[in-house]
Image (cartoon, rainbow, N blue to C red):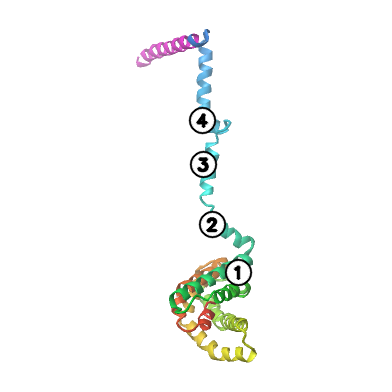
Amino acid sequence: MGSSRGNPLKSLSNRCLLRLSSDTHSLFHGKTFNETSLTTQRRGFYSFSSPNKLASCKGSHPLRSFSTSSSSSKVGFLGWYLAKLESNPIITKSVTTSLIFAAADFTSQMITSASSYDSIRTLRMAGYGLLLLGPSQHLWFNLLSKALPKRDMLTTFKKMFLGQAVFGPLVTTVFFSYNAALQGENAEEIAARLKRDLLPTLISGAMFWPTCDFVTYKFVPVHLQFLFLHMDNLFDVHGKLKQSEHRVVGLLT
């Protein structure tokens, strides 16, 4: 019974709506249109209201705009830097190491040096990171990841031992020799510097770097390991610089 009452009311409502639409159309266009045209307009309206139709209209791309904005939020300096690490790893790591060394030396001089700022020293540090340490670290970390690919405790301790026994002494020796040669020292003076500073530097580093090495080799992805170690360098550099200009920077390996 409710259905029989509802149908006349619905029919009456449709006729009123049709009449109103017809009168409005006639007022503006001087024409009438039937229920078929009204139904067509209704279908067109509902069709136009769908998200896909709206997105396909000229000059309107809401879905594409939303996708673009959400993806662009992931793009920035970090995304650009990670892309460079993948496409140009040696150059990117070398430049990064150079900038970190320059920043570490600059801030250390501002805090600990009583004399005027030595820009040549900062350039030496930057050059060491760019030409020597950056490329060598890239090769070293990749070599370890291929030779010892696992991240279990035993493998991690093996990497730590190799870093402290092989890579650390090697790059520190290279640094002392590089830095002394740029200051005009001859072979005998360089040898004397190594004899005086190398072992104390390595002993001092053994008090700090094994912990950093453990975290690096255990948890940090290979392509970011150099960056994690250099962040440690940057935060710890001021304490190390209490020893000497050369010995301290040699620890930054």
Indicate the secondary structure of the residue bearing disc 3.
helix
Which residue type does callout 3 highlight?
A: Phe
Q: Is residue 83 left or right of residue 14?
A: right
Query: What residue sits 60% from the left and 62% below the top?
Result: 85
The residue under label 3 is: 66
The residue under label 4 is: 50
The residue closer to the viewer here, 188 or 51, is: 188
Marks 4/2: CA–CA distance: 37 Å
Which residue type does callout 4 highlight?
A: Ser
Indicate the secondary structure of the residue bearing disc 1.
helix
Numbered range of the magenta stretch: 1-26
Whether 217 is drawn above or below 206: the answer is: above
Residue 151's disc number: none
Residue 94's disc number: 1
Indicate the secondary structure of the residue bearing disc 4.
loop
Which residue type does callout 1 highlight?
A: Ser
* Main secondary structure along the magenta-highlighted residues: helix
Q: Magenta stretch: residue 25 in it? A: yes
Q: Nearer the viewer, mark 1 or mark 3?
A: 1
Residue 77's disc number: 2
Q: Quadrant of the N terminus?
A: top left
Marks 2/1: CA–CA distance: 18 Å
Which residue type does callout 2 highlight?
A: Phe
Residue 168 place in picture, x, y as percent: 56, 81
Q: Is residue 250 visible?
A: yes
Marks 1/3: CA–CA distance: 37 Å
Mark 3 or mark 4, which has the lower sequence index? Answer: 4
Marks 3/4: CA–CA distance: 16 Å
Mark 4 or mark 2, which has the lower sequence index? Answer: 4
Name the outermost residue toward the front. Answer: 116
